Amino acid sequence: MSLAVRVIPCLDVAGGRVVKGVNFLNLRDAGDPVELAARYYEQGADELTFLDVTATVDDHSTTYDVVRRTAEQVFIPLTVGGGVRTVDDVARLLASGADKVGINSAALARPELIGEIADRFGEQVIVLSLDVKRSDAVPSGFVVTTHGGKRDTTRDAIAWATEAVERGAGELLVNSIDADGTLAGFDIDLISAVGAASSAPVIASGGAGRLEHFAPAIAAGADAVLAASVFHDGTFTIGQVKDALSRAGEVVR
């Protein structure tokens, strides 16, 4: 586990606007990505994650202009994902201001892509995004999905996480589709399973709704916690999350 727990707001972007839904469905407008990024930077976010949630579904490139403008407003690590298909896509995102790049569907389609990116830019650049839901179809009970959770694969999430790290993924962003947007808490079983199987840092995502939800995710094996709607809606600030983690005995930045 890293020395300090990271708190990461997530900006899910579609059509140049931040959106949020429940279980990856019924997306609603949540604001301007550049304005929100600046707000979270001021609140003390450790990193920002920017995901173009329709890039793969709509088969278009990530909005590099929004990435560039966001990077100009914040001076903390920025992870960008959505529609990343090639090493050249990664190069362009890094040139636009991203520090790390999230990959999902393209890596599932061609796992060799992970190693190609790692060889050119280093493992620290790669955040493997796993959109996971519970399923009896795979041994672990957790199956990987693609296209914003719309398509199931035959990939066992735990086996895929392990393989991806072996291929060069530097970090794992574990999104629980079942918990996403429900505000009922992180999927602790999923975080525990991935954390136990992976040597790479784990970011827990999906389900945060109360301040007391964050510490159990860290206790389960996550190195960082990611949330969206609770920050977008002003339910609480990043500082309040850090205070709650600190009270629970976790080290925060």
Image (cartoon, rainbow, N blue to C red):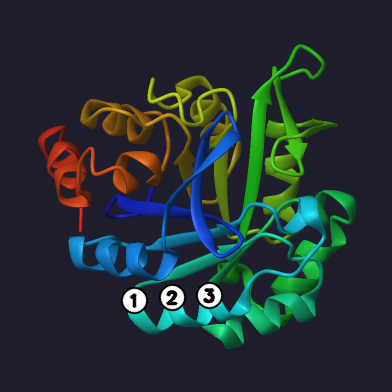
Q: Looking at the figure, which quarter contains the C terminus?
A: bottom left
Q: Which mark is residue 66?
A: 3
Callout 2 crowding tier (Cα within 10 Å): few <14, some 14–19, many ≥20: many
Q: Nearer the viewer, mark 3 or mark 1?
A: 3
Is residue 222 rendered to the left or right of residue 132?
A: left
Cβ atoms under marks 3 and 1 closer than 8 Å: no
Cβ atoms under marks 3 and 2 closer than 8 Å: yes
Residue 10 appears at what percent x and percent y?
A: 44, 52
Residue 91 appears at what percent x and percent y?
A: 69, 83
**Residue sitting at 21 percent across and 42 percent down?**
241
**Residue 184 to residue 218: above or below:** above
Q: Is residue 11 visible?
A: yes
* Residue under label 1: 74
Query: Which of the two discs, 3 and 1, labels the residue nearer the N terminus?
Result: 3
In the image, 190 versus 102, the foreground residue is 102
Q: Which mark is residue 70?
A: 2
Secondary structure of the residue carrying tag 2 is: helix
Is residue 193 rendered to the left or right of residue 206?
A: right
**Residue sitting at 51 percent across and 65 percent down?**
79
Q: CA distance from mark 3 to mark 1?
A: 13 Å
Q: Is residue 98 visible?
A: no
Secondary structure of the residue carrying tag 3 is: helix
The amino acid type, in three-letter code, at marker 2 is Thr
